[in-house]
Image (cartoon, grey):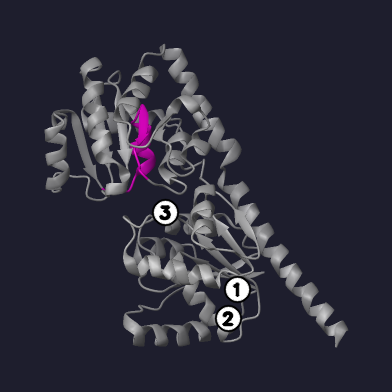
């Protein structure tokens, strides 16, 4: 079985990381894979190459670059001769149809990784692209969404594929695991005592991530837990972000905030936390929640996307934009007895191991590839009999 992945780019992102995990854990004795990036190699592309997977970069810029990129992708596809093509993200979904037009007759899978289709949050060109893809959504053999929220959002704008599948993200529960030494090391680096409540938010600086809600909740929480600390890790979550610093100052929590910026050792960050907060206004399937829980860190989240499905506990999900409810949920957690908090940590880990283990997710993709390829072979045989 040969699978060709086509993705918009390979810089750090949720879709890109999931592709990396899928490739890294797929059985190479039965599934051979290659990757085409429409734009750049990026950090994730380098990691995919390090796994020994051929990764081709088209560096598409402008209409002429698109035509050249499609021509090169056609040659690459003919050389690799994939049984299945799987595209990731909207631009790659549209691009993949070009290979169909060039004669690829095998199964084509689109892979949707978001639920953020709100007019206020999505650029006009992207909204137009999504409407075009909705009209073309019968062409792929299957459309996979990584969240029920993503499927619902795309259905609402007109997606009507021949087949839907919802396959959530999977997590490497070996890499993301409770680690007492990592916890000690992180807290030492942050100059935080072992007993101080530490609440983190992990992700890029973006308005949909709800930083004003986080700041307001932190301000309320500090009234009852003055020794609490708030860790912010991710792109632009550093002192150079004047907008963020101003927000934290206005909430009077800057003195309690630890701004780490982008981090490579995410398991180390997660292990240093007591709670992870997700204050998003919109989500698909938030990776950070699964990564934190795999490390034994309970999460409190707004009811965005599939967050509630991942967490699996109603008392840890609050309404979108509800800073008061967020702070109250944090307080309920730290009001628990130490043994009860320890039990929550264990339960968080078990939920990810049981429901979102990367190996189970990979098996679902492998089964889908084989099922679609088998259907293709059956159709070919029936057509041959008919003629």
Residue ID at (65%, 59%): 366
Q: Is residue 90 above or below residue 329?
A: below
- In x, y percent, where is residue 121? 32, 55
> Per the image, is 270 magenta?
yes
Instruction: Say whether disc 1 or disc 3 marks the residue closer to the N-terminus.
Output: 3
Instruction: Say whether disc 1 or disc 2 marks the residue closer to the N-terminus.
Output: 2
**Nearest to viewer (mark 1 / mark 2):** 1
* Label 1: few (<14), some (14–19) or many (≥20) C-alpha neighbours in 10 Å: some
* Label 2: few (<14), some (14–19) or many (≥20) C-alpha neighbours in 10 Å: some
For disc 2, the marked residue is 100
- In x, y percent, where is residue 23? 53, 60
Asked whether the viewer can see residue 255, the reply is: yes
Residue ID at (47%, 87%): 71
Element class at badge 3? helix
Stretch in magenta: 262-281
Q: Is residue 132 above or below residue 298?
A: below
- In x, y percent, where is residue 50? 44, 63
For disc 3, the marked residue is 14
Assess whether mark 2 and mark 1 are in contact (beta carbons under 8 angstroms): yes
How far apart in space, not on screen, are marks 1 and 3 (Cα)?
25 Å
Instruction: Say whether disc 2 or disc 3 marks the residue closer to the N-terminus.
Output: 3
How far apart in space, not on screen, are marks 1 and 2 (Cα)?
9 Å
Residue ID at (51%, 45%): 172
Q: In this orientation, which residue lies closer to the viewer: 109 or 304?
A: 304
**Nearest to viewer (mark 1 / mark 3):** 1
Q: Is residue 26 above or below residue 204?
A: below
Q: Which mark is residue 139?
A: 1
Quadrant in which the N terminus is drawn: bottom right
């Amino acid at each position: 079985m040969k699978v060709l992945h086509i993705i918009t780019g390979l810089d750090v992102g949720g879709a890109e990381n999931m592709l990396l995990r899928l490739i890294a854990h797929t059985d190479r004795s039965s599934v051979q894979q290659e990757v085409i990036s429409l734009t750049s190699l990026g950090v994730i592309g380098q990691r995919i190459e390090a796994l020994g997977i051929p990764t081709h970069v088209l560096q598409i810029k402008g209409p002429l670059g698109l035509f050249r990129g499609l021509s090169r992708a056609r040659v690459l596809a003919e050389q690799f001769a994939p049984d299945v093509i799987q595209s990731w993200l909207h631009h790659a979904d549209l691009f993949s149809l070009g290979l169909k037009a060039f004669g690829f007759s095998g199964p084509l899978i689109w892979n949707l990784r978001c639920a953020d289709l709100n007019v206020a949050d999505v650029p006009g060109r992207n909204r137009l692209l999504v409407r075009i893809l909705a009209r073309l959504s019968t062409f792929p053999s299957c459309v996979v969404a990584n969240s029920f929220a993503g499927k619902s959002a795309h259905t609402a704008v007109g997606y009507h594929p021949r087949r839907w599948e919802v396959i959530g993200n999977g997590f490497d529960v070996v890499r993301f695991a409770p680690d007492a030494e990592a916890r000690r090391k992180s807290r030492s680096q942050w100059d935080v005592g072992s007993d101080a409540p530490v609440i983190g938010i992990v992700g890029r600086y973006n308005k949909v991530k709800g930083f004003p809600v986080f700041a307001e909740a932190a301000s309320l929480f500090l009234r009852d837990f003055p020794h609490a600390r708030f860790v912010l890790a991710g792109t632009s979550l550093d002192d150079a972000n004047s907008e963020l610093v101003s927000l934290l100052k206005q909430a009077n929590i800057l003195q309690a905030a630890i701004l780490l910026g982008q981090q490579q050792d995410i398991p180390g960050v997660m292990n240093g936390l007591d709670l992870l907060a997700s204050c998003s206004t919109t989500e698909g399937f938030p990776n950070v929640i699964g990564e934190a829980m795999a490390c034994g860190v309970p999460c409190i989240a707004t009811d965005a996307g599939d967050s509630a499905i991942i967490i699996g506990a109603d008392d840890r999900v609050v309404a979108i934009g509800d800073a008061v409810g967020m702070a109250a949920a944090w307080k309920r957690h730290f009001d628990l007895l130490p043994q009860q908090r320890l039990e929550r940590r264990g339960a968080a880990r078990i939920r990810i191991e049981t429901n979102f283990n990367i190996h189970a997710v990979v098996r679902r993709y492998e089964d889908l590839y084989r099922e679609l390829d088998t259907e293709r072979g059956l159709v070919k045989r029936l057509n041959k009999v008919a003629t």
